[in-house]
Image (spheres, grey):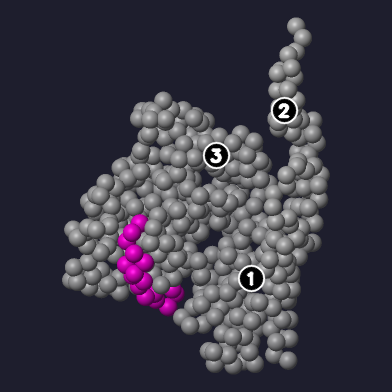
Amino acid sequence: MPKTKEAEDIETRTEGLGDLPADEFRRHLHAVADWVADYREGIASRPVSPTASPGEVANSLPAVAPEQPETMDAIFADLNRLIIPNLVHWGHPQFLAYFGSTTTAPGILGEMIAAALNVSAMTWRTSPAATELETVVLEWLRGMLGLPADFKGIVYDTASVAILHALAAARERANTDVRALGLAGRGDVPAMRIYASDQAHSSIEKAAITLGLGERNVRRVVTDEDFRLNVEALRAAVDEDLQNGLRPLAVVATVGTTSTTSVDPVLEIARLCRERDLWLHVDAAYGGALALLPEGRWAMEGVGEADSIVVNPHKWLFVPLDFSALYTRRPDLLRRIFALTPEYLRGDASAHEENYMDYGIQLGRRFRALKAWMVFRTFGREGLAARIREHCRLARLFASWVEAEDNFRLLAPVTMGVVCFQAMPNSQHETTLANEFNAALVERINRTGKVYLTRTELRGQTAVRLAVGNILTTEDHLKNAWDIIRSEAERMQK
């Protein structure tokens, strides 16, 4: 039967509206695979950071989206010409800032597969294998960390989002009925206080802001000489707030603080929380990984007494961004706050099945468990532990180089993979001069493009902060970094 004019018009209009042809996609997929492998293999030869000025990349790109299709070859050419040279290469072995890069080959492969599948792990029925794999991976991780069996895990993107949910559970436990009534306009809810050390992460304030508790109701508590939360000062702060009619709600203890990787005395804090009926959340986003080492179990002492704990495999367990695991003894509180099933989901959301959408603000959820499953299987617990142990060794080795130099000094104990130190200009100890010198030193080092560091402040002292966390980083890379640090410090004093 001959085609009608209408059928011919429809065919003309819809031609080419599908995806890339399979053979073309396969060709580009192979090219991308080779590009990724070449990038990882040769990353050490690249500058760690670019010399671009603000706006330079944006100004090199068109101001409006293209009207007509462009070829993938042209897109890849611009990627290599405009984007890649203007990135900070977090996977570089001499990127020694923050907590290092957890990019690994199995993690990259997992991300590629997850992107191809593009499932949403919101309910069991929409993603049976994704849901159950998430449960299995979380149980594997719980076991490796030595957490009690009554902790249930949920995957979020980052620890900032995990703590938001943990503190939401703490607020729900306080019987404020915020889900139904909110906080605005209410006079029956006292100001609720959250306590954390002066070294704890800023995500606590962000959670308080988001939950309507208020930034000012996060009370920072002084730390001891090793930057650990002072329990007696915590007790005094809680009692003072009680006397003033405030409602102490939760304490956030940290295992591996961002600046120094200090470890709060969690067991003592847990006892105080039980005495005062406070929720205890433990931020072990970084330091929890140390528990994979028999000699590192000390860092998790008392953590099993907490109400919730977060660990980020994307910080020191070699799972690429993003993957944050929250464990809690009270998942019922999260469900009470967040479980909400609209009509359009009822066919796919049975109460008899595990639906991870019920434990948080997200409905759509990435298949994050796949990459973690592949990383954990590829390296095994012993392989993960061995890599963490090596990072600790490298950090101690670097610290020994600092201690051996007359014009440098350590500013904090080295307990994990982070070293905080300071260059002393002309052996001077005057605080203002030393702070300005070290802030400028970090800037100069980073401008070389050969090393990337960060700085922090410890009791009024500006510290240069170096972190080892990349499986590509070797002793030779640290030696190179140390040579550059000393060289730049010497140039600044001439």
Residue 402, image x, y percentages = 63, 78
Residue 460, image x, y percentages = 48, 83
Query: On the rendered structure, is 249 left or right of 462?
Result: left
The local secondary structure at tag 1 comes to loop
Quarter placement of the C terminus: bottom right
In the picture of the structure, the residue carrying the numbered disc 1 is: 453
Quarter placement of the N terminus: top right
Picture residue at 41% right of the left edge, 55% below the top? 163
N-terminal of the two: label 1 or label 3?
3
Nearer to me, 187 or 244: 187
Asked whether residue 72 is drawn in magenta, I would say no
Q: Which mark is residue 367?
A: 3
N-terminal of the two: label 3 or label 2?
2
Nearer to me, 358 or 264: 358
Q: Are marks 3 and 2 in contact (CB under 8 Å)?
A: no
The local secondary structure at tag 2 comes to helix
**What amino acid is found at the position of numbered circle 1 in the picture?**
Leu
Picture residue at 35% right of the left edge, 30% below the top? 351
Q: Is residue 383 above or below residue 137?
A: below
